[in-house]
Amino acid sequence: MSSDAHGALRGLRLIEMGQLIAGPFCGQLMADHGAEVIKIEPPGTGDPMRGWGQGIPLWWSVVARNKKCITVNLREAEGQDIVRRLAEKSDFLLENFRPGTMEKWSLGWESLHELNRRLIMIRVSGFGQTGPYAKRAGYGSIGEAMGGMRYLAGDPSTPPSRVGLSIGDSLAATYACLGAMMALHHRERTGEGQMVDAAIYEAVLAMMESTVAEFTVGGIIRERTGSILPGIAPSNIYPAKDGEILIGANQDSVWARMSQAMGKPELAADDRFRDHVSRGRNQAELDDMISAWTATFDTENLLGLLERAGVPAGRIYKAPDMLQDPQFLARDALQTVPHPEHENLVMQAPAPRLSATPGSIRWPGPPELGQHNEEILGELLGMDSAARADLSDRGII
């Protein structure tokens, strides 16, 4: 862990407005890779993420890592002016308020673009900046539902399920970050910034593979299928003596290797299983056959056998499993971060990995509200201590 930014985005500054997940996760991705991210929080209360997490609230330590945090009351004209001054000195401004909020504060795209022609404005919302739903409240769960993901999640015997993560928010944030990098490349060629409009429901929709095309051409509506994908076999969770493993052997050549590992090489040529279509047609029969075989092994021996055969397989991990896995350890996929209140925290490393300009975790989410007010408002914007004290007394910062 380094105290200095050295990632691919080093030298770029992002102003992060908004709160909770969709906007801040985009900011986390950019901060991980070296951008100077200045997070704006409301005075007195801060981002609600400071109190989120199961058990001890630690989500803030992850989503606000590598960020500098200042307090600004955005509902006051003087607070809005601080944002303008920061925008003049920045490469990106990120917000995830309900559409129309920034315009109400005279901080909309047209105003900021006129102020700084090179600025890239990243806007994350439930339904985007335009359209009849634009000003609706749009949490990630709603985007997951309307984008089509919730309908497909879970077992067919139950109502639609949710993934145990804020996947809609995270997808929108990831697409927002991708859009920001596209806009940055455009700026390098033209000198002009632009607005990135990332909608949660559209980010989810973008992940929906061929589901819409299948319906428009063939009238097919995909349904919930639990642990399988219909027609993709064998690819499922299978029992062992002491647990379960996931095996993915649906490619013809891999299935041939698996049938060898099972001691039944003839299955690879069996008319029921010899190719992708036939295995899909006989998926349940094949899964039953494999389950009967895997249930005779403990997981360690089964995984070793499949690895030697070149068949993709793995345990289904929880956090304790990740902490002990040699692959995670070898690649430093989980990193230890010093924390003033919780000693050392372990959290996921930045992704993806770049060979020349890797990302890094330099510090966890700042525990103190307004921790960087002096550095940003004083040193960057030139406010002396008396001016900062006056703004603080009046609830502006």
Image (cartoon, helix red, strand yellow):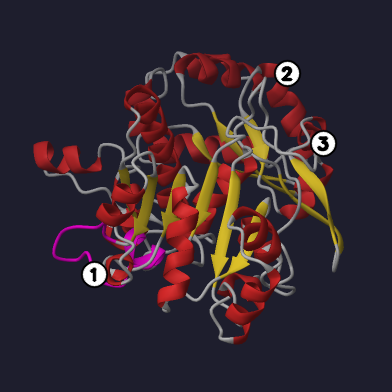
Residue 305, position in %: x, y? 74, 25
Residue located at (31% from left, 41% from top): 194
Answer few, some or many: residues within 10 Å of disc 2's Cα (few below 14, many 20 plus, some between 14 and 19): few
**Residue 248 visible in the current orientation:** yes
Is 137 contained in the magenta span?
A: yes
Where are the magenta residues, as a range? Answer: 127-144
In the orientation shown, which residue stands out farthest toward the right? 343
Left or right, 77 with respect to 331, comes to left
Q: Disc 3 to disc 2, how far (Cα)?
A: 22 Å
Element at badge 1?
loop
Is 126 contained in the magenta span?
A: no
User: With respect to residue 294, does 257 lie above or below?
Assistant: above
Q: Main secondary structure of the magenta part?
A: loop
Residue located at (18% from left, 57% from top): 130
Mark number for residue 308? 2
Name the residue type under label 1: Lys
User: With respect to residue 28, does 193 lie above or below?
Assistant: above
Q: Disc 2 to disc 1, how far (Cα)?
A: 55 Å
